[in-house]
Amino acid sequence: MAGKDGDTYRIKITAPPVEGKANHALIDYLSGILEVPKGNVQIVSGESSRMKTLRIAGRSLKEIHERLDAAML
């Protein structure tokens, strides 16, 4: 976790942005932090961009923020 700017979380992924590897690494990371199945984390927009919009099922927005904030410590 690299930081937070308003409601935007900055996450550094070391996987290369080739053949979706960085997107898969992001989904793996978030599913682990949020303790949800990988299938519950979906990139809605920005698959080929650094800025992504995600849909996460199985957690409330409050729970998501709490878990991501705790991961930044």
Image: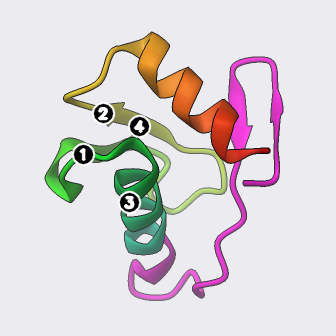
Q: Which amino acid type is marked by label 2?
A: Ile
Q: Which residues are magenta?
A: 1-22
Judge from the rendering whether residue 59 lies leftward or rightward of residue 68; answer left or right: left
Q: Amino acid at mark 1?
A: Val
Indicate the secondary structure of the residue bearing disc 2: strand
Which label's residue is closer to the chain start, 3 or 4?
A: 3
**Mark 4 and mark 1 in contact (Cβ < 8 Å)?**
no
Secondary structure that dominates the magenta span = loop
Q: Sort mark 3 into few (<14), some (14-19) or many (20+) by Cα contacts within 10 Å.
A: many
For the residue carrying disc 1, how many other residues have a C-alpha within 10 Å: few (<14), some (14-19), or many (20+)?
Answer: some
Residue at the spot of label 2: 56
What residue lies at 39% left-to-right and 86% top-to-bottom?
19
Mark 1 vs mark 4, CA separation in Å: 14 Å
- The figure's colour scheme reads rainbow
Mark 2 in CB contact with mark 1 (< 8 angstroms): yes
Question: What mark, if any, has residue 27 been given in the picture?
Answer: 3
Q: Position of residue 55 (x, y in %)?
A: 32, 32
